[in-house]
Image (cartoon, rainbow, N blue to C red):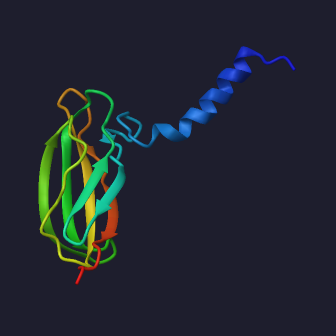
Amino acid sequence: MKLKIKDVMLALLLLAVPFWGLVSCSDDDGGIMGPVAINSCQCTATTVTPIWTLVPNDNCDGYIITLYLGTRENLGEMVEQLTFDHRTCQYTFTGLTPDTDYVICTQAIPSASSGFSDAQLYWKEFTTLAAEN
């Protein structure tokens, strides 16, 4: 079977398209930068360490990471909000309550030269572990 270059390129394009939206710094959304996914969320009874995706270009100056009590459907009060530079991809929140629902929200900070006015939010729910007796 003889494959044409055009067919191979089309197949590669079709495979790549679903991955473009995972960390988006394109202007497809009319000036809104895509969400920054949380790849891993490691928690204990009193801590959580989210690890988020770094945006792979200079369109982002950093990240805003916000921790809330509750769930997305029943969002509680903000526990803590921190800003990180563009090279940081994880942080450990401490002093959490055991066996409690929390939500982490990540958002990129678009650079002034990026042309983006804002960025989408990414939400991750988790429950801290029960306290050991």
Looking at the rendered image, the quarter that the N terminus falls into is top right
Name the one closer to the observer, 56 or 29: 56
Q: Work out whether 80 lies above or below 112.
A: below
Q: Work out whether 118 lies above or below 46.
A: above
- The residue shown at (31%, 47%) is 52
- The residue shown at (14%, 63%) is 94
- The residue shown at (21%, 34%) is 87
Q: Position of residue 51 (x, y in %)?
A: 30, 49
Looking at the rendered image, the quarter that the C terminus falls into is bottom left
Is 86 on the left-hand or right-hand side of 16?
Answer: left
Name the one closer to the observer, 96 or 25: 96
- The residue shown at (24%, 80%) is 132
Number of numbered labels in the structure image: 0
Q: Position of residue 33 (x, y in %)?
A: 32, 41
Q: Position of residue 121 (x, y in %)?
A: 30, 54
Name the one closer to the observer, 106 or 94: 94
Name the one closer to the observer, 119 or 85: 85
Query: Residue farthest to the right?
Result: 1
Is 94 on the left-hand or right-hand side of 9?
Answer: left
Query: Residue farthest to the front?
Result: 133
Q: Position of residue 89 (x, y in %)?
A: 25, 43
